[in-house]
Amino acid sequence: MNSTEARILAERLAAADDAALARLLESRRIAPRAPWHDFFDAAEALLAPDAVARAVAALPRDALAQLAAQSGPERLGLTDPDGRPYQAVRVALGGIAPVPTPDRTPAAASESAAAHAAERAFTTLSTLADVLLLAVRTPLSRVGSGTLGASDRRRMLQAEIVRDLHEADELVALAEVTGLLAVADRAWLVTPRGAQWVAESTPVRWAHLATALRTALPAGLRSPGGGWIAPSLWGDAYPLDEEWPARARHWRRLMELTGLTAEGESRDEPPTEPAWAVSLREGGDADPAPLVALLPHEVDRVFLQNDLTAISPGPLAPALDVRLQGIATRESHAQASTYRFTESSIAGALSAGETAAGILEFLSEISLTGVPQPLEYLVQRIAERHGLVRVAVDPDSGHTVVTSRDAGLLETIAVDQALRALGLVPDGERLRTRVARETAYWALADARYPVVAVDRHGRTETLARHRIAAAEDDAGPEDRYAALVERLRSAHGADADRAWLERELDAAVRDKALLSVEVALPDGSTRSFTLEATGLGGGRLRGRDRGADVERTLPVKSITSVRHV
């Protein structure tokens, strides 16, 4: 490492504002708890060969072209104030000289290619909504490699949400980068934004998804105007990153799923661009109108049948589909979807806060055939039975108690092997457990018992499982690195020259380096000594004078300069 450059960088770091420092540390993936004591530590760590190689490999094509030509602006941590790369950066570049990204406009998609892209986007929107609804009920497991767990892949296949396992991974990846899913405790949870997105109309769904995907694109794929460069150029966006080709294919696939790219004229031709992607690529707002014109017509009515099924004659409007899936189980998903009402599906709706009157009113509004008597009878019968089991907290002991006016049902619960984990024990005409009320409630609900939760005043209340991710952390890099930046600034005293000199001497002693040392003498003159540094302490440098072959001890405060021989 060039010590002169390290000192220059340390001074530049000290002069930078907190926001610039935080952005640098984030871009270099520095841990907020890095064990640095001062800016000299930071400079040496940032200029270490391995650290520089990683930083340079992560640079996009245009940044590498500027570094190679020494024509760009200062890149804090990689160049001097004039934009000239440090020695370690020049070594990492290895003599490459990429040309800047050319200005290229994608070819317009043909009519058939645009139709296929619209169909793909519509399929993605509906299947992605199904993935989120599945994740709301049960969080999606995330294995150590960062992929979807096998059990959840099978769940999606069995529910006919996806056609194959690879599609399941792609949909989860798309939901994560667009902020609809978030990782928490080795699982994917639906975010507040995702919960809202599910109930939006199809045009709003697509506009949000496309805009969020554009925001998530790596810097090397973004254009100066805020859009993206032509997808045919994506493969060369990060020339020094060995893993980039696979990542480029991944990003192109996400764009394809969202309908932002279409097929080329042949398999070997680059992707083309549908009309609705132009504004986004140029940095403008999403315009779903050209896309919506090619999508299937959505319906807001269904046929309710005596066999306790509902048939949608076309794609059901998203908000209606979401609510209907909360009351019935969807058996098929196509242009004409089928939903089936069961005791468990209606009981689940009641447990989630629906009422019999609300269910029947909703079904009456969307039905083309009225509400069949068998379905109305089923809803009312389940509602009358719902609440037969009550879960509350005993105010005296703080324990959870389970009660029911049906003694036989209470006895069944007491011996139900599926509820053994609750540790229910008889206590007069009720059951008692030490687990929390919410835990007992959901265990009974999952076991299909007609259970309700009761508050301390004896009123029933609706419980919601905590399956929505916590609100997003709005803390930016400046907040995350505040403690580290403050520590570096507090250690940076006014006499930076003296601090750097002591640092150089300490390193020379460790390396037993040969130094040329300039010393100010009491009479005002200076004298040069060539020493092999052997020790530093008590404000004095010790070393063997190569010229006189004697041991010398020099006061550090009298040393004016040091040069490696």
Image (cartoon, grey):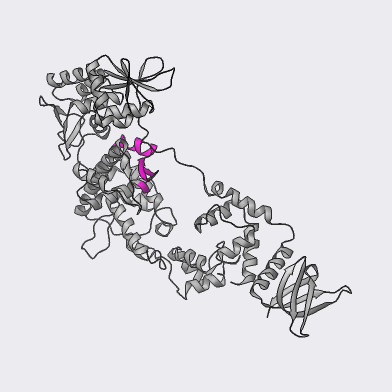
Residue at the extreme left: 306
For the N terminus, the quadrant is bottom right
Q: Residue at x 30, y 15 (%)?
A: 429
For the C terminus, the quadrant is bottom right
Q: Is residue 182 magenta?
A: yes
Q: Residue at x 28, y 30 (%)?
A: 419
* Viewer-side residue, 462 vs 89: 462
Q: Residue at x 29, y 31 (%)?
A: 420
* Viewer-side residue, 270 vs 353: 353
* Viewer-side residue, 443 vs 507: 443
Q: Is residue 91 at all visible to an observer of this figure?
A: yes
Q: Does residue 171 sit above or below 70 in this rendering? A: above
Where residue 498 sits, quadrant-wise, is bottom right
Q: Is residue 247 magenta?
A: no
Residue at the extreme right: 523
In the image, which residues are magenta?
176-201
In the image, is 100 to the left or to the right of 364?
A: right
